[in-house]
Amino acid sequence: MPRYCTTALMALAAWGLIWIAPVRADDTADMHAEISKLKSELESLSRQDAAELESAIESYLAETDSWKGAQGEDKWSAITMGAAVTAVNQNTLALDPGNKSVVNGRVDFWFNFNVAEGLEIHIELLGATGGTFPAEFPLDQGGFGPPATLAGAFDGIGVNSTVSTRPLGGVQVREAFIRYAYAAGNTTLNWELGMVDPRDRFLQNAFMSNQYTGFMHNQFKDASAISWATNGFSSVPGAGASPTILSLYGWVSFGQDDAFTVSYGWFNTPGTFFDSGQLYVQLGWKGQVRGREMNVQLMWVYDNAYNKLIGNGEDADNQWGASWDWMASDNIGLFFRIAGNTESTNFVESSAAFGLVYTDIGARKDEAGLAIGYVKGNPESLIGALPEDTEWSLELYYKFMLADGKFQITPNLIYVADPGGGGLAWEDDSLFILGVRFYVPF
């Protein structure tokens, strides 16, 4: 018989004894003793039953998915999030006729929702300030001529790689997409559908592709000769600024240890999505050379967007790029990247960058980097005739890793020879920029 029933019967029996027992003076003491004994046993059983009942309820709730879902425990555990604050100050040195100091910054938030196995929702929000650099320079140099550097002439980003590719003002959605991994036999097909930035997925380099922790000059983050679907505050006539880009992006890895990866994607503005867009295809290899990681990417882009947007009658542009990086020793990483195009839509005909990074310096694990960049302007592009059709850049940085690497302070020095091809926007043929970046990720 269940313990709960036993308790009830004993309680009933106790009350029965009270009512039916003959009341005699000589039996009063025995009767009170018996009643006290029954009450004590009844209270003990009641406390034990209550504890067991409470334990049974808690065990049931802990094992019941529907209750956990109602309380939101499962959903919260399926959400990961992060944030970062970045601030940048850049200052020209010995610039004729006058120097300029520019400060800007951005706040990033990202959320990842694990909907089901292999299915995720990713959202990245961005709040960015104005003060883009070097877009303001022509205003100080006469207000005409090409943008400050050839490297930033097409996409308007230039020497500050943290410049947003979304419109300024309020909080913007930088990326928002569905990520789905589909198992097809021994192969997994990965897809991302939504707002996806191709800059963060193609020609990636282990030592140049992070604008928050690596080099400041955007030439070293994004190849200047590629007409990326996203841009900053573009100086391209008709191109507007910071377009919203939707994409259908995917990748598949194969070979031993998934050493090879084929990436592909179609990128375009909303609306007539499959008309006049960009197609990206890349083959990547990741392996070990002398026991250290090496990465190689070969990319091809079919650009049928900017030629029609600008309206210059150009045919679709075939663009290409190659990226290589290798951790040559415990502390030294080497890198190289080159890119080019076949038409004159982009102001840059070809670009290249190479250099090294020295990691794990001292007890704080500081880092130093040196990069050299080359840009060749396109003489047939909208940039027009220039005194020089080449531009050289050099950047040196040292990153202080504070608070166990969570507070990063990176002073940097950028030198640009013949900025903007030596066009009318400049009186000097050299540009020196001394800057510092503060970065705190969470």
Image (spheres, rainbow, N blue to C red):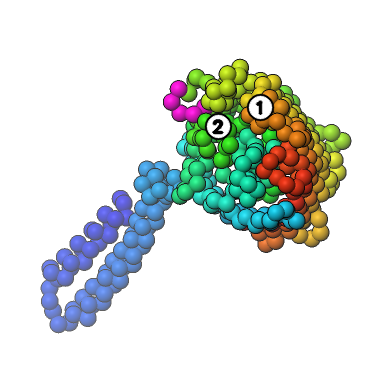
Disc sitting over residue 381 in the figure: 1
Residue at point 30%, 68% (across, down): 43
User: Badge 2, how many Cα within 10 Å: few under 14, some, many 20+?
Assistant: few
Residue at point 40%, 43% (across, down): 65
Q: Total label count?
A: 2
Amino acid type assigned to the residue bearing label 2 in the image: Pro
In depth, the one of 426 and 434 nearer the eye is: 426
Question: Helix, strand, or loop for circle 2?
Answer: loop
Residue at point 12%, 68% (across, down): 20
Bounds of the magenta span?
268-272
Q: In the rendered structure, are the residues bearing label 2 and label 1 in contact, judged by CB atoms less than 8 Å apart?
A: no
Q: Going from the N terminus, do you reach mark 2 or mark 1 first?
A: 2
Residue 57 in sight: yes
Position above or below: 258 against 314: below
Position above or below: 192 against 53: above
Left or right of 12? Residue 352 is right
Residue at point 62%, 55% (across, down): 102
Amino acid type assigned to the residue bearing label 1 in the image: Ser
Residue 8: x, y in percent? 24, 59
Position above or below: 74 against 40: above
In depth, the one of 149 and 84 nearer the eye is: 149
Question: What is the distance, in whole Å, between disc 2 and disc 1 at their CAs?
Answer: 12 Å
Question: Helix, strand, or loop for circle 1?
Answer: loop
* Magenta highlight on residue 134: no
Q: Which residue is mark 2?
A: 237
Q: Quadrant of the C terminus?
A: bottom right
Left or right of 70? Residue 262 is right
Q: Please, what is the dominant secondary structure of the magenta stretch? A: loop
User: Badge 1, how many Cα within 10 Å: few under 14, some, many 20+?
Assistant: some
In depth, the one of 261 and 271 nearer the eye is: 271
Left or right of 175? Residue 28 is left
